[in-house]
């Protein structure tokens, strides 16, 4: 069993109620009950409970949240830390009862960034190398080589330069793609990557991107950023890989861009309503690959370790490493 | 128009027959006629012709070959260079008339290596991230997240440490896979990659490889290397990505390994008979992805430039950079 402590101290800690951190799970319980067991295993000094099982709300110093309700934070006056279970925090920031003076952290580890990089790289290669055509040909026992283009001649544009953008850019550079990144600050770019930022930067990145990848966080500024105006700047027949948040995309504009040929192929992992309703036209569109918001995951065990580390930092008067800048929204 | 010469000298050279290099195309003409036009465009000082169009065989100093016949080299006593159109030279080495004292080169450029790296990376991700399951779920409008594993926990083994093996290993490392390589010499390994060589090395690599990738050249030593003995050493449910040569694989052993569950999925790009016959059971096997020997390509223009560069080196008393070691067979 992996724990935060070295062997020998277990029994002392188990009987020492003062050393325990008590936490509450807020929001979509169906995706979160695994966390109670994971924390118990990985970080037994943090006790996690569902709201209905909390006997003393005053004792709760930590909240783990995903899409919490507007009033969910209200009963807990002594919170020292709020954490998301993933990279996104827009659902938490939307809760009216989120205390303004408590550090909010997100889970954005290296292993998630690598998962995202692999997921996106697969889609880039799927489009570039036309594997869909190979599958169709295999179905009819048809042997046909396809024309090829060097990766270095294919301009890939990333929106977002966080950990995920960085890992994705490095993976695509290793495959020789011509990679550029648009980000708010224009800083922290991997080697060999062209950076765009500022007002005209987004337009210039779109204009050069044969394959555009959205990895932005959802903020008031980025809501609806994937719209007709942006698509119109992209090269004819461009491709879109959307792994940000459903609310980044204006769906009607996407259909228009596909119908008009501006976009020739789209991969969507995130949606305004999730799970994507069964009758949504995305499912059956021949130019759209749908995946179930599954590009990357933090495991409950990872979350437990990151939260334990953050609580330790708070005890030492430091903020968690992945603390959210509430003004920026991520 | 791209040429090897700077502007101004064209007309002088066109009338100067002495400066011309005359070459002949040997082997499968259906895939090679593009080369005549490509050489004319890219390297007009090298004239390429089909054997039936050669008026003076004594004047031929260069041969471009792919699967030539046993006697195809015989009419040309003054060859200074023989080149393959691709990385493979086993078909050329098999020709009885190949002169023993003429440098033989293969085309193994950086852009081919990058193409191979992209092709293989796609298959690794296809298997690891279960994209086939996502497609099946999209077909039935079914939203289901899949369990995930970190790339760093997945052991990928490469057979072959040439340019293609190196580029592939670097791309997979950028995605955090645990990469090892088996090669004859055990040298020239990319950073962070475990090397295996020697007698027991192949067995040890197979034993650790959840995903095994064959990039070896075809030589007497490697013929039939993908066989029951090798598969038996691999972990239960392992995956195979075969992009070497058809003759590396014992087909009956592959079917047995798939039926017995030793292998759970296979990607095949190369076959003993190409094009793969329409009635071959590979086409419809649910655990096999078939592609038409298309992992990477050298363009005829690239071949022209590499050959021109090699002829220049020979004029200066140096061997081509990609000269084949006939003893090793690649």
Image (tube, coloured by chain):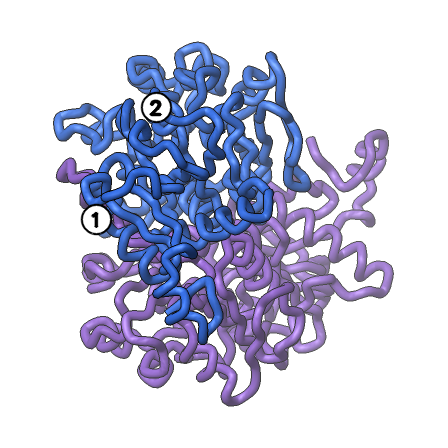
Chain colours: A blue, B purple
Where residue A34 appears, x then y in whole percent? Answer: 25, 52
- Label 2 resides on the chain identified as A
For the view shown, which residue lies furthest in the bottom direction?
B199
Task: Please name the residue shown 26% across and 35% down the image.
Answer: A27
- Label 1 resides on the chain identified as A
Under circle 2, the secondary element is loop
Q: Name which of mark 1 and mark 2 comes first in the sequence.
A: 2
Which residue does the numbered mark 2 point to in the structure image? A97
Q: In which quarter of the image is the N terminus of chain A?
A: bottom left
Where residue B309 appears, x then y in whole percent? Answer: 75, 52
Where residue B281 appears, x then y in whole percent? Answer: 20, 64
Work out whether residue B309 can be spotted: yes
Q: Which of marks 1 and 2 is in front?
A: 2
Q: Label 1 to label 2, Cα distance in Å?
A: 55 Å
Of residue B254 and residue A319, the one placed in the foreground of this image is: A319
Near mark 1 (Cα within 10 A), the count class, few <14, some 14-19 or many ≥20, is: few
Task: Please name the residue shown 36% across and 74% down the image.
Answer: B249
Q: In this view, does B303 lie to the left or right of A4?
A: right
Looking at the image, residue B253 lies above or below residue A84: below
Quadrant in the picture for residue A92: top left
Task: Please name the residue shown 33% across and 54% down the image.
Answer: B148
Work out whether residue B85 can be spotted: no
Looking at the image, residue B184 lies above or below residue A16: below
Near mark 2 (Cα within 10 A), the count class, few <14, some 14-19 or many ≥20, is: some
Disc 1 and disc 2 on one polypeptide chain: yes
Which residue does the numbered mark 1 point to in the structure image? A139
Q: Is residue A55 left or right of residue A162?
A: left
Where residue B136 appears, x then y in whole percent? Answer: 19, 45
Under circle 1, the secondary element is helix
Of residue B71 and residue A23, the one placed in the foreground of this image is: A23
Looking at the image, residue A135 lies above or below residue B268: above
């Amino acid at each position: 069993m992996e724990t935060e402590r070295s062997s020998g101290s277990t029994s002392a800690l188990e009987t020492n109620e003062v050393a325990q951190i008590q936490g509450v799970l807020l929001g979509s319980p169906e995706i979160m009950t695994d966390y109670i067991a994971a924390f118990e295993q990985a970080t037994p000094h943090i006790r996690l409970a569902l709201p209905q099982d909390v006997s003393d709300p005053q004792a709760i110093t930590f909240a783990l949240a995903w899409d919490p309700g507007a009033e969910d934070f209200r009963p807990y006056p002594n919170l020292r830390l709020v954490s998301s279970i993933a990279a996104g925090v827009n659902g938490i920031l939307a809760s009216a009862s989120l205390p303004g003076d408590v550090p909010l952290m997100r889970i954005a580890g290296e292993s998630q960034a690598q998962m995202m990089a692999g997921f996106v790289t697969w889609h880039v290669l799927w489009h570039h190398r036309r594997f869909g055509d190979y599958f169709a040909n295999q179905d009819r026992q048809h042997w046909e080589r396809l024309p090829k283009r060097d990766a270095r001649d294919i301009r890939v544009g990333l929106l977002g330069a966080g950990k995920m953008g960085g890992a994705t850019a490095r993976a695509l550079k290793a495959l020789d793609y011509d990679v550029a990144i648009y980000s708010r600050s224009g800083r922290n770019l991997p080697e060999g990557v062209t950076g765009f930022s500022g007002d005209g930067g987004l337009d210039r990145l779109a204009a050069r991107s044969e394959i555009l990848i959205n990895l932005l966080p959802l903020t008031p500024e980025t809501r609806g950023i994937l719209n007709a105006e942006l698509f119109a700047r992209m090269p004819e027949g461009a491709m879109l890989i959307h792994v940000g948040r459903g609310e980044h995309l204006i769906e009607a504009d996407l259909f228009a861009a596909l119908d008009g040929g501006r976009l020739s192929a789209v991969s969507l992992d995130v949606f305004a309503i999730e799970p994507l309703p069964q009758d949504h036209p995305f499912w059956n569109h021949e130019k759209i690959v749908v995946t179930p918001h599954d590009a990357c995951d933090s495991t409950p065990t990872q979350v437990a370790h990151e939260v334990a580390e953050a609580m330790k930092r708070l005890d030492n008067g430091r903020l968690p490493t992945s603390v959210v800048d509430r003004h920026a929204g991520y």
